[in-house]
Image (cartoon, grey):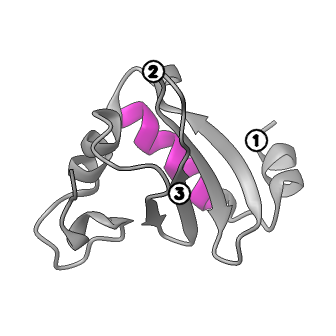
Amino acid sequence: MTLPDEFDTIAPRDGQAFEPADVLREMFVNAHTPDTVLTYYDLQLQRQFVDGPGRVWDVYTTDDTYIETLNLDACRTVSELEDTLKELAACDPDDRADWVAWSR
C-alpha cells in the first residue's frame, strides 16, 4: 500500500488536510512499507523491516545520527506514541547520549 505524500510528514502539518494523529494511526496499522521515512519536526523516523509481527521504527536526527528505536507494540495508544515523539522533539538531541541523559 502506498500512502499519499501528505503522510510523509507527521508534524508540523501546517495547512495540510490531515492531523498528526491521522499519520500516527497509519503507523499503528502498519500502512507503511519498510524503509519508509517520516518527518517529525527535526527528527526522521525510519520503519525497520521486521520478520514477523512487529512495528519498529528507528529515530534519527536530520543529519542521520541514530537516537532511539521505537517499538510501537509497546505503545498502547496513538496518544502515547505522540507523547513519546513530543518528548523526543522537545529534547532536540544531537545524539543518543543526549537523549539518554535527558530522558532520565
According to the picture, the residue beneath numbered tag 1 turns out to be: 103
Q: Amino acid at mark 2?
A: Pro
Query: Residue 68: percent from the left, percent from the top?
Result: 70, 46
Magenta stretch prevailing secondary structure: helix
State the separation of the CA atoms marked 2 and 1: 28 Å
Please tell me whether mark 3 sits on a helix, a strand or a loop.
strand
The quarter of the picture where residue 12 lies is bottom left
Residue sitting nearer the eye, 48 or 73: 48
Give the residue furthest to the left: 17
Tell me which numbered mark, 3 or 1, is placed earlier along the sequence. 3
Q: Is residue 73 above or below residue 99?
A: above
* Mark 3 vs mark 2, CA separation in Å: 19 Å
For label 2, the crowd category at 10 Å Cα-Cα, with few meaning under 14, some 14 to 19 and many 20 or more, is: few
Q: Residue at x 27, y 71 (%)?
A: 13
Which of disc 1 and disc 2 is earlier in sequence? 2
Residue at the (62%, 54%) spot, across then down: 59
Q: Which residue is mark 2?
A: 53
Q: Could you give the CA–CA distance between mark 3 and mark 1, rounded to whole angstroms? A: 18 Å
Q: Write the start and end of the magenta stretch as one range.
A: 79-90
Q: Nearer the viewer, residue 94 or 27?
A: 27
Q: Identify the residue at horizontal 40%, vertical 20% (top origin).
A: 76
**For the residue marked with disc 1, what is the amino acid?**
Ser
* Residue 91, image x, y percentages: 68, 58
The circle drawn on residue 45 is 3
Displayed quadrant of residue 79: top left
Local crowd at mark 3 within 10 Å, few (<14), some, or many (≥20)? Answer: many
Q: Earlier in the sequence, mark 3 or mark 2?
A: 3
